[in-house]
Amino acid sequence: MATVTAAPGPSFRGRVVRPEDPTYDEDRRVWNGSVDRRPALIACCAGVADVMDAVRFAAAEGLAPAVRSGGHSFPGHSVCDDGLVIDLSALRGIRVDPEARTVRAQAGVLLGELDRETQAFGLAVPAGIVTTTGLAGLTLGGGIGWLMRKYGLTIDQLLSVDVVTADGSFLKASEKENAELFWGIRGGGGNFGIVTEFEFRLNPVGPVVLAGPVLWPMEESARLLRLYRDWITDVPDELTTAVVHRRVPPVPFMPRELHGRPVVMVVCCYAGPVEDGEKVLRPLREAGPPPLLDLCAPKPFTAHQAMFDPSFPRGRWYYFKSCDVDRLEDGIIDLTAEHAARIASPLTAFPVFQLGGAIRRVGEEETAFGGRSHGHTFNINGTTEGPEGFEAEREWARGLWSALAPYQTGVYSNFLMEEGEDRVAQAYGEAKYRRLRELKRHYDPGNLFRLNQNIPPAAP
Protein backbone atom coordinates (compact mmCIF):
# COMPACT_ATOMS: atom_id res chain seq x y z
CA MET A 1 0.00 0.00 0.00
CA ALA A 2 1.17 3.49 -0.81
CA THR A 3 2.07 5.65 2.19
CA VAL A 4 0.98 9.28 2.19
CA THR A 5 2.48 11.45 4.91
CA ALA A 6 0.86 14.72 3.81
CA ALA A 7 -2.78 15.65 4.30
CA PRO A 8 -5.25 18.31 3.11
CA GLY A 9 -4.39 21.82 4.32
CA PRO A 10 -4.51 23.06 7.93
CA SER A 11 -7.94 24.60 7.36
CA PHE A 12 -9.50 21.16 6.75
CA ARG A 13 -12.33 20.78 9.32
CA GLY A 14 -13.26 17.15 8.77
CA ARG A 15 -11.55 13.92 9.77
CA VAL A 16 -8.49 12.57 7.99
CA VAL A 17 -8.29 8.78 8.37
CA ARG A 18 -5.10 6.81 7.77
CA PRO A 19 -4.56 3.04 7.59
CA GLU A 20 -3.22 2.95 11.15
CA ASP A 21 -6.29 4.69 12.60
CA PRO A 22 -8.80 2.59 14.56
CA THR A 23 -11.75 3.61 12.37
CA TYR A 24 -9.95 2.90 9.08
CA ASP A 25 -11.51 -0.49 8.33
CA GLU A 26 -15.02 0.76 9.01
CA ASP A 27 -14.47 4.01 7.11
CA ARG A 28 -13.26 2.19 4.00
CA ARG A 29 -16.20 -0.25 3.89
CA VAL A 30 -18.76 0.20 1.15
CA TRP A 31 -22.16 -1.33 0.40
CA ASN A 32 -20.91 -4.13 -1.88
CA GLY A 33 -19.15 -6.59 0.42
CA SER A 34 -17.23 -8.17 -2.46
CA VAL A 35 -15.22 -4.93 -2.75
CA ASP A 36 -12.22 -4.82 -0.39
CA ARG A 37 -9.90 -1.90 -1.17
CA ARG A 38 -7.37 -0.04 0.95
CA PRO A 39 -7.02 3.69 0.25
CA ALA A 40 -3.92 5.58 1.32
CA LEU A 41 -6.06 8.28 2.93
CA ILE A 42 -9.72 9.03 3.62
CA ALA A 43 -10.78 12.68 3.81
CA CYS A 44 -14.15 12.90 5.60
CA CYS A 45 -15.31 16.34 4.56
CA ALA A 46 -17.27 18.63 6.88
CA GLY A 47 -18.25 21.15 4.21
CA VAL A 48 -17.69 22.42 0.69
CA ALA A 49 -14.39 24.10 1.61
CA ASP A 50 -13.10 20.70 2.71
CA VAL A 51 -14.09 19.21 -0.64
CA MET A 52 -12.15 21.95 -2.44
CA ASP A 53 -9.11 21.34 -0.23
CA ALA A 54 -9.31 17.57 -0.79
CA VAL A 55 -9.50 17.93 -4.57
CA ARG A 56 -6.50 20.27 -4.65
CA PHE A 57 -4.58 17.91 -2.38
CA ALA A 58 -5.37 14.90 -4.60
CA ALA A 59 -4.17 16.75 -7.69
CA ALA A 60 -1.00 17.98 -6.00
CA GLU A 61 -0.10 14.54 -4.63
CA GLY A 62 -1.02 12.63 -7.79
CA LEU A 63 -3.70 10.64 -5.95
CA ALA A 64 -6.72 9.42 -7.89
CA PRO A 65 -9.76 10.45 -5.80
CA ALA A 66 -12.64 8.06 -5.17
CA VAL A 67 -15.74 10.06 -4.29
CA ARG A 68 -18.20 8.61 -1.79
CA SER A 69 -21.63 9.83 -0.80
CA GLY A 70 -23.77 6.78 -0.01
CA GLY A 71 -21.09 4.25 -0.95
CA HIS A 72 -23.66 2.31 -3.00
CA SER A 73 -21.71 2.10 -6.28
CA PHE A 74 -22.14 -1.43 -7.68
CA PRO A 75 -18.47 -1.85 -8.71
CA GLY A 76 -17.21 -0.07 -5.60
CA HIS A 77 -16.09 3.21 -7.15
CA SER A 78 -16.63 4.81 -3.71
CA VAL A 79 -13.32 3.38 -2.49
CA CYS A 80 -9.92 2.71 -4.05
CA ASP A 81 -6.54 1.12 -3.52
CA ASP A 82 -3.69 3.54 -2.69
CA GLY A 83 -5.64 6.67 -3.60
CA LEU A 84 -7.68 9.27 -1.72
CA VAL A 85 -11.30 8.72 -0.72
CA ILE A 86 -13.20 12.01 -0.59
CA ASP A 87 -16.03 11.12 1.76
CA LEU A 88 -19.12 13.35 1.51
CA SER A 89 -21.31 11.37 3.90
CA ALA A 90 -21.37 14.16 6.51
CA LEU A 91 -22.91 16.62 4.03
CA ARG A 92 -26.52 15.76 4.91
CA GLY A 93 -28.38 19.08 4.76
CA ILE A 94 -31.89 19.12 3.23
CA ARG A 95 -34.04 22.22 2.80
CA VAL A 96 -37.58 21.92 1.42
CA ASP A 97 -39.48 24.91 0.06
CA PRO A 98 -43.07 23.62 -0.09
CA GLU A 99 -44.40 26.83 -1.63
CA ALA A 100 -41.95 26.82 -4.53
CA ARG A 101 -42.01 23.00 -4.62
CA THR A 102 -38.23 22.74 -4.59
CA VAL A 103 -35.68 21.05 -2.37
CA ARG A 104 -31.95 21.56 -1.90
CA ALA A 105 -30.03 18.48 -0.79
CA GLN A 106 -26.33 18.02 -0.09
CA ALA A 107 -24.24 15.25 -1.57
CA GLY A 108 -24.22 12.96 1.46
CA VAL A 109 -28.01 12.64 1.62
CA LEU A 110 -29.52 9.15 1.33
CA LEU A 111 -32.76 8.55 -0.55
CA GLY A 112 -34.72 7.65 2.58
CA GLU A 113 -33.69 10.91 4.24
CA LEU A 114 -34.82 12.90 1.23
CA ASP A 115 -38.18 11.07 1.15
CA ARG A 116 -38.79 11.74 4.84
CA GLU A 117 -38.33 15.49 4.45
CA THR A 118 -40.26 15.90 1.20
CA GLN A 119 -43.14 13.57 2.08
CA ALA A 120 -43.89 15.73 5.13
CA PHE A 121 -45.41 18.06 2.52
CA GLY A 122 -46.86 15.37 0.22
CA LEU A 123 -44.03 15.94 -2.27
CA ALA A 124 -41.25 13.79 -3.73
CA VAL A 125 -38.32 13.58 -6.09
CA PRO A 126 -38.45 10.40 -8.22
CA ALA A 127 -35.34 8.61 -7.00
CA GLY A 128 -34.33 4.99 -6.64
CA ILE A 129 -35.74 1.85 -5.03
CA VAL A 130 -33.48 1.37 -1.97
CA THR A 131 -33.53 4.03 0.72
CA THR A 132 -29.88 3.60 1.72
CA THR A 133 -28.68 4.58 -1.76
CA GLY A 134 -26.75 7.85 -1.98
CA LEU A 135 -28.65 10.60 -3.76
CA ALA A 136 -25.54 11.95 -5.52
CA GLY A 137 -24.40 8.89 -7.43
CA LEU A 138 -27.94 7.87 -8.34
CA THR A 139 -28.74 11.34 -9.71
CA LEU A 140 -25.56 11.80 -11.71
CA GLY A 141 -26.17 8.57 -13.61
CA GLY A 142 -29.81 9.38 -14.37
CA GLY A 143 -31.93 8.04 -11.54
CA ILE A 144 -34.63 5.43 -12.17
CA GLY A 145 -37.27 4.62 -9.56
CA TRP A 146 -40.94 4.09 -8.73
CA LEU A 147 -42.13 7.49 -9.98
CA MET A 148 -40.20 7.65 -13.24
CA ARG A 149 -43.04 6.95 -15.67
CA LYS A 150 -45.14 9.70 -14.07
CA TYR A 151 -42.47 12.34 -13.46
CA GLY A 152 -39.33 11.20 -15.28
CA LEU A 153 -35.83 10.42 -14.08
CA THR A 154 -34.19 12.04 -11.08
CA ILE A 155 -32.14 14.24 -13.44
CA ASP A 156 -35.35 15.47 -15.05
CA GLN A 157 -36.19 17.22 -11.76
CA LEU A 158 -32.76 18.84 -11.44
CA LEU A 159 -32.77 22.65 -11.45
CA SER A 160 -29.17 23.41 -10.49
CA VAL A 161 -26.04 21.98 -8.92
CA ASP A 162 -23.00 23.23 -7.01
CA VAL A 163 -19.80 21.68 -8.36
CA VAL A 164 -16.15 21.48 -7.29
CA THR A 165 -14.09 21.01 -10.46
CA ALA A 166 -10.74 19.27 -10.97
CA ASP A 167 -8.71 22.40 -10.15
CA GLY A 168 -10.55 22.85 -6.85
CA SER A 169 -12.74 25.68 -8.12
CA PHE A 170 -16.39 26.09 -7.11
CA LEU A 171 -19.10 26.88 -9.62
CA LYS A 172 -22.83 26.53 -10.22
CA ALA A 173 -24.49 24.92 -13.20
CA SER A 174 -28.05 25.15 -14.46
CA GLU A 175 -29.91 25.69 -17.72
CA LYS A 176 -28.78 29.36 -17.60
CA GLU A 177 -25.32 29.08 -16.07
CA ASN A 178 -22.60 26.73 -17.34
CA ALA A 179 -25.33 25.08 -19.38
CA GLU A 180 -23.07 22.61 -21.20
CA LEU A 181 -21.75 21.31 -17.88
CA PHE A 182 -25.31 21.03 -16.61
CA TRP A 183 -26.17 18.99 -19.70
CA GLY A 184 -23.29 16.59 -19.06
CA ILE A 185 -23.88 16.21 -15.34
CA ARG A 186 -27.40 14.96 -16.06
CA GLY A 187 -26.37 11.40 -16.86
CA GLY A 188 -22.60 11.69 -17.29
CA GLY A 189 -21.77 10.62 -13.74
CA GLY A 190 -18.97 12.07 -11.66
CA ASN A 191 -16.66 12.70 -14.60
CA PHE A 192 -16.70 16.51 -14.52
CA GLY A 193 -16.38 17.35 -10.84
CA ILE A 194 -17.82 16.70 -7.41
CA VAL A 195 -21.40 17.88 -6.99
CA THR A 196 -21.78 19.08 -3.41
CA GLU A 197 -25.43 20.20 -3.56
CA PHE A 198 -28.46 19.54 -5.76
CA GLU A 199 -31.59 21.63 -6.28
CA PHE A 200 -34.64 19.65 -7.42
CA ARG A 201 -38.19 20.34 -8.51
CA LEU A 202 -40.71 18.54 -6.29
CA ASN A 203 -43.80 16.65 -7.40
CA PRO A 204 -47.06 15.84 -5.58
CA VAL A 205 -47.05 12.20 -4.44
CA GLY A 206 -49.16 10.35 -1.90
CA PRO A 207 -48.51 10.33 0.93
CA VAL A 208 -50.53 7.11 0.35
CA VAL A 209 -50.05 5.18 -2.90
CA LEU A 210 -51.27 1.84 -4.24
CA ALA A 211 -48.09 -0.20 -4.28
CA GLY A 212 -46.47 -3.55 -3.60
CA PRO A 213 -45.81 -6.97 -5.16
CA VAL A 214 -48.16 -9.56 -6.61
CA LEU A 215 -46.55 -13.03 -6.56
CA TRP A 216 -46.92 -16.11 -8.77
CA PRO A 217 -45.05 -19.44 -8.79
CA MET A 218 -41.80 -19.26 -10.76
CA GLU A 219 -43.04 -21.93 -13.17
CA GLU A 220 -45.66 -19.43 -14.38
CA SER A 221 -42.95 -16.98 -15.45
CA ALA A 222 -43.18 -17.28 -19.25
CA ARG A 223 -46.98 -17.25 -19.23
CA LEU A 224 -47.13 -14.33 -16.83
CA LEU A 225 -44.56 -12.27 -18.74
CA ARG A 226 -46.60 -12.57 -21.92
CA LEU A 227 -49.70 -11.39 -20.08
CA TYR A 228 -47.68 -8.60 -18.46
CA ARG A 229 -46.30 -7.50 -21.86
CA ASP A 230 -49.81 -7.13 -23.24
CA TRP A 231 -51.15 -5.43 -20.11
CA ILE A 232 -48.53 -2.67 -19.97
CA THR A 233 -49.09 -1.55 -23.57
CA ASP A 234 -51.83 0.86 -22.49
CA VAL A 235 -51.41 1.42 -18.75
CA PRO A 236 -51.27 5.09 -17.69
CA ASP A 237 -48.02 6.84 -16.83
CA GLU A 238 -49.04 6.93 -13.17
CA LEU A 239 -48.10 3.24 -13.02
CA THR A 240 -44.48 2.08 -12.83
CA THR A 241 -43.74 -1.64 -12.49
CA ALA A 242 -40.84 -4.05 -12.21
CA VAL A 243 -40.89 -7.80 -12.72
CA VAL A 244 -38.73 -9.60 -10.15
CA HIS A 245 -37.64 -13.24 -10.12
CA ARG A 246 -36.28 -14.65 -6.86
CA ARG A 247 -36.91 -16.96 -3.93
CA VAL A 248 -39.30 -15.51 -1.35
CA PRO A 249 -37.15 -13.81 1.30
CA PRO A 250 -37.71 -14.44 5.02
CA VAL A 251 -39.02 -10.95 5.73
CA PRO A 252 -41.91 -10.21 8.11
CA PHE A 253 -44.43 -9.20 5.44
CA MET A 254 -44.02 -12.53 3.57
CA PRO A 255 -45.90 -15.59 4.96
CA ARG A 256 -43.52 -18.09 6.56
CA GLU A 257 -44.86 -20.97 4.46
CA LEU A 258 -43.67 -19.20 1.28
CA HIS A 259 -40.14 -18.46 2.49
CA GLY A 260 -37.61 -19.85 0.01
CA ARG A 261 -40.16 -20.63 -2.69
CA PRO A 262 -39.15 -19.57 -6.22
CA VAL A 263 -41.54 -16.88 -7.47
CA VAL A 264 -42.04 -14.26 -10.13
CA MET A 265 -43.57 -11.03 -8.90
CA VAL A 266 -44.86 -7.86 -10.49
CA VAL A 267 -44.08 -4.96 -8.17
CA CYS A 268 -46.30 -1.93 -8.77
CA CYS A 269 -46.45 1.70 -7.73
CA TYR A 270 -49.41 3.81 -8.83
CA ALA A 271 -48.68 7.53 -8.40
CA GLY A 272 -52.29 8.68 -8.57
CA PRO A 273 -55.63 8.13 -6.81
CA VAL A 274 -55.76 4.68 -5.20
CA GLU A 275 -59.19 3.89 -6.66
CA ASP A 276 -57.88 4.58 -10.19
CA GLY A 277 -54.93 2.32 -9.55
CA GLU A 278 -57.21 -0.52 -8.48
CA LYS A 279 -58.96 -0.37 -11.85
CA VAL A 280 -55.67 -0.38 -13.74
CA LEU A 281 -54.37 -3.42 -11.83
CA ARG A 282 -57.55 -5.47 -12.19
CA PRO A 283 -56.60 -7.12 -15.54
CA LEU A 284 -53.26 -8.26 -14.16
CA ARG A 285 -54.90 -9.72 -11.09
CA GLU A 286 -57.79 -11.41 -12.89
CA ALA A 287 -56.74 -12.34 -16.41
CA GLY A 288 -53.73 -14.49 -15.64
CA PRO A 289 -52.95 -17.45 -13.41
CA PRO A 290 -54.15 -17.01 -9.83
CA PRO A 291 -51.49 -15.27 -7.73
CA LEU A 292 -49.90 -16.94 -4.74
CA LEU A 293 -50.02 -13.69 -2.81
CA ASP A 294 -51.22 -10.15 -3.48
CA LEU A 295 -49.52 -7.47 -1.39
CA CYS A 296 -50.31 -4.54 -3.66
CA ALA A 297 -52.34 -2.30 -1.37
CA PRO A 298 -52.63 1.31 -0.20
CA LYS A 299 -49.61 2.26 1.90
CA PRO A 300 -47.39 5.27 2.65
CA PHE A 301 -45.07 6.03 -0.25
CA THR A 302 -42.13 5.99 2.16
CA ALA A 303 -43.02 2.41 3.19
CA HIS A 304 -43.03 1.28 -0.42
CA GLN A 305 -39.73 3.02 -1.08
CA ALA A 306 -38.18 0.95 1.73
CA MET A 307 -39.66 -2.37 0.60
CA PHE A 308 -36.48 -3.60 -1.16
CA ASP A 309 -34.15 -2.50 1.66
CA PRO A 310 -34.02 -5.94 3.36
CA SER A 311 -33.03 -7.53 0.03
CA PHE A 312 -30.05 -5.23 -0.55
CA PRO A 313 -28.32 -4.61 2.80
CA ARG A 314 -24.80 -3.38 3.18
CA GLY A 315 -22.12 -6.06 3.28
CA ARG A 316 -23.54 -8.79 1.07
CA TRP A 317 -21.58 -9.81 -2.02
CA TYR A 318 -23.18 -8.43 -5.18
CA TYR A 319 -22.41 -8.89 -8.85
CA PHE A 320 -24.38 -7.15 -11.60
CA LYS A 321 -24.86 -7.33 -15.34
CA SER A 322 -27.33 -5.09 -17.10
CA CYS A 323 -28.85 -4.25 -20.44
CA ASP A 324 -31.78 -2.37 -21.96
CA VAL A 325 -34.23 -3.91 -24.42
CA ASP A 326 -36.92 -2.28 -26.52
CA ARG A 327 -39.73 -4.71 -25.68
CA LEU A 328 -40.28 -8.11 -24.10
CA GLU A 329 -40.15 -10.22 -27.23
CA ASP A 330 -40.96 -13.93 -26.99
CA GLY A 331 -37.28 -14.83 -27.15
CA ILE A 332 -36.46 -12.53 -24.24
CA ILE A 333 -39.34 -13.91 -22.20
CA ASP A 334 -38.32 -17.51 -22.77
CA LEU A 335 -34.67 -16.81 -21.89
CA THR A 336 -35.68 -14.90 -18.77
CA ALA A 337 -37.93 -17.71 -17.53
CA GLU A 338 -35.33 -20.37 -18.34
CA HIS A 339 -32.47 -18.64 -16.52
CA ALA A 340 -34.61 -17.49 -13.59
CA ALA A 341 -35.41 -21.14 -12.86
CA ARG A 342 -31.66 -21.71 -12.34
CA ILE A 343 -31.26 -19.20 -9.51
CA ALA A 344 -29.53 -21.04 -6.67
CA SER A 345 -28.87 -18.36 -4.04
CA PRO A 346 -31.80 -17.42 -1.77
CA LEU A 347 -30.53 -13.83 -1.95
CA THR A 348 -30.38 -13.34 -5.72
CA ALA A 349 -33.21 -11.15 -7.00
CA PHE A 350 -33.20 -9.55 -10.42
CA PRO A 351 -35.67 -6.85 -11.46
CA VAL A 352 -36.73 -5.92 -14.98
CA PHE A 353 -37.85 -2.29 -14.86
CA GLN A 354 -40.61 -0.86 -17.04
CA LEU A 355 -39.52 2.38 -18.70
CA GLY A 356 -41.41 4.78 -20.99
CA GLY A 357 -43.93 7.40 -19.96
CA ALA A 358 -42.38 10.68 -18.81
CA ILE A 359 -38.86 9.39 -19.50
CA ARG A 360 -39.60 9.52 -23.22
CA ARG A 361 -41.17 12.95 -23.08
CA VAL A 362 -37.76 14.53 -22.50
CA GLY A 363 -35.83 14.92 -25.74
CA GLU A 364 -32.96 12.49 -26.26
CA GLU A 365 -30.51 15.38 -26.73
CA GLU A 366 -31.68 17.46 -23.75
CA THR A 367 -29.50 15.57 -21.25
CA ALA A 368 -26.47 13.29 -21.42
CA PHE A 369 -28.55 10.30 -20.29
CA GLY A 370 -28.91 7.74 -23.07
CA GLY A 371 -31.71 5.34 -23.91
CA ARG A 372 -34.87 7.34 -23.27
CA SER A 373 -36.73 5.38 -25.95
CA HIS A 374 -35.92 1.97 -24.50
CA GLY A 375 -38.68 -0.20 -23.06
CA HIS A 376 -37.09 -2.10 -20.16
CA THR A 377 -33.90 -2.27 -18.10
CA PHE A 378 -32.62 -5.67 -16.93
CA ASN A 379 -30.72 -5.45 -13.64
CA ILE A 380 -29.30 -8.97 -13.41
CA ASN A 381 -27.64 -9.43 -10.05
CA GLY A 382 -26.22 -12.46 -8.30
CA THR A 383 -26.05 -12.11 -4.53
CA THR A 384 -24.60 -14.17 -1.70
CA GLU A 385 -24.00 -13.56 2.00
CA GLY A 386 -20.25 -13.81 1.48
CA PRO A 387 -17.69 -15.50 -0.76
CA GLU A 388 -19.31 -18.94 -0.58
CA GLY A 389 -21.29 -19.55 -3.76
CA PHE A 390 -20.46 -16.10 -5.16
CA GLU A 391 -18.61 -17.36 -8.21
CA ALA A 392 -21.58 -19.52 -9.21
CA GLU A 393 -24.00 -16.58 -8.91
CA ARG A 394 -21.66 -14.37 -10.89
CA GLU A 395 -21.50 -16.92 -13.69
CA TRP A 396 -25.29 -17.25 -13.64
CA ALA A 397 -25.65 -13.46 -14.08
CA ARG A 398 -23.12 -13.45 -16.92
CA GLY A 399 -24.93 -16.34 -18.55
CA LEU A 400 -28.31 -14.61 -18.68
CA TRP A 401 -26.73 -11.37 -19.88
CA SER A 402 -24.87 -13.18 -22.66
CA ALA A 403 -28.02 -15.01 -23.72
CA LEU A 404 -29.80 -11.66 -24.06
CA ALA A 405 -27.04 -10.20 -26.27
CA PRO A 406 -29.04 -10.37 -29.54
CA TYR A 407 -31.79 -8.22 -28.02
CA GLN A 408 -29.72 -5.59 -26.18
CA THR A 409 -30.19 -1.95 -27.18
CA GLY A 410 -28.03 -0.19 -24.59
CA VAL A 411 -27.24 -0.06 -20.89
CA TYR A 412 -27.91 2.20 -17.90
CA SER A 413 -24.56 3.52 -16.66
CA ASN A 414 -25.50 3.22 -12.97
CA PHE A 415 -25.89 -0.55 -13.47
CA LEU A 416 -22.43 -1.11 -14.99
CA MET A 417 -19.60 -2.91 -13.20
CA GLU A 418 -15.97 -2.54 -14.34
CA GLU A 419 -16.68 -3.29 -18.01
CA GLY A 420 -14.42 -0.97 -19.97
CA GLU A 421 -14.70 2.06 -22.21
CA ASP A 422 -16.77 0.41 -24.93
CA ARG A 423 -19.57 -0.39 -22.50
CA VAL A 424 -19.50 3.13 -21.07
CA ALA A 425 -19.73 4.51 -24.59
CA GLN A 426 -22.67 2.18 -25.27
CA ALA A 427 -24.60 3.84 -22.43
CA TYR A 428 -24.57 7.16 -24.31
CA GLY A 429 -24.31 6.40 -28.01
CA GLU A 430 -21.59 7.62 -30.34
CA ALA A 431 -22.62 11.29 -30.75
CA LYS A 432 -23.25 11.94 -27.07
CA TYR A 433 -20.07 10.16 -26.09
CA ARG A 434 -18.03 12.46 -28.33
CA ARG A 435 -19.73 15.49 -26.80
CA LEU A 436 -19.07 14.19 -23.29
CA ARG A 437 -15.39 13.65 -24.08
CA GLU A 438 -15.11 17.27 -25.25
CA LEU A 439 -16.78 18.40 -22.03
CA LYS A 440 -14.38 16.26 -20.03
CA ARG A 441 -11.42 17.87 -21.83
CA HIS A 442 -12.69 21.29 -20.80
CA TYR A 443 -13.34 20.57 -17.11
CA ASP A 444 -10.94 17.71 -16.31
CA PRO A 445 -8.26 17.47 -19.02
CA GLY A 446 -5.98 15.40 -16.80
CA ASN A 447 -8.75 12.89 -15.99
CA LEU A 448 -8.34 13.38 -12.26
CA PHE A 449 -11.89 12.08 -11.75
CA ARG A 450 -11.34 8.68 -13.33
CA LEU A 451 -12.52 6.29 -10.60
CA ASN A 452 -16.03 6.10 -12.04
CA GLN A 453 -17.69 4.93 -15.26
CA ASN A 454 -14.97 6.91 -16.89
CA ILE A 455 -15.27 9.15 -19.93
CA PRO A 456 -11.70 10.00 -20.97
CA PRO A 457 -11.03 13.54 -22.21
CA ALA A 458 -10.92 14.10 -25.95
CA ALA A 459 -7.45 14.61 -27.40
CA PRO A 460 -6.40 18.28 -27.63
Image: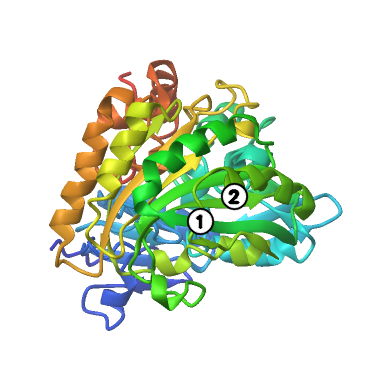
Compared to 342, does 88 lie above or below? Answer: below
* Residue at numbered disc 2: 285
Outermost residue to the right: 99
Q: Is residue 341 left or right of residue 129?
A: left
Q: Position of residue 30 (x, y in %)?
A: 33, 65
Q: Position of residue 391 (x, y in %)?
A: 13, 56
Compared to 246, does 203 lie above or below? Answer: above
Locate the C terminus and report the quarter of the image it occupies: top left
At 21% from the left and 64% from the top, the residue drawn is 36
* Residue at numbered disc 1: 291
Kindly check if marks 2 and 1 are in contact, taking CB atoms under 8 A apart as contact: yes
Dot 2 or dot 1: first in sequence order is 2
Question: In terms of image quadrants, where is residue 158?
Answer: top right
Q: Position of residue 339 (x, y in %)?
A: 25, 44
Mark 2 Cα shell of 10 Å, populated few (<14), some (14-19), many (≥20)? some
At 79% from the left and 62% from the top, the residue drawn is 121
Query: Amino acid under label 2?
Result: Arg
Compared to 188, does 414 lie above or below? Answer: below
Between 85 and 238, the one nearer to me in the picture? 238
Q: Is residue 72 left or right of residue 24?
A: right
Q: Position of residue 46 (x, y in %)?
A: 51, 68
Question: In terms of image quadrants, where is residue 361?
Answer: top right
Mark 1 Cα shell of 10 Å, populated few (<14), some (14-19), many (≥20)? some
Element type at mark 2? helix
Inter-mark Cα distance, 2 to 1: 7 Å
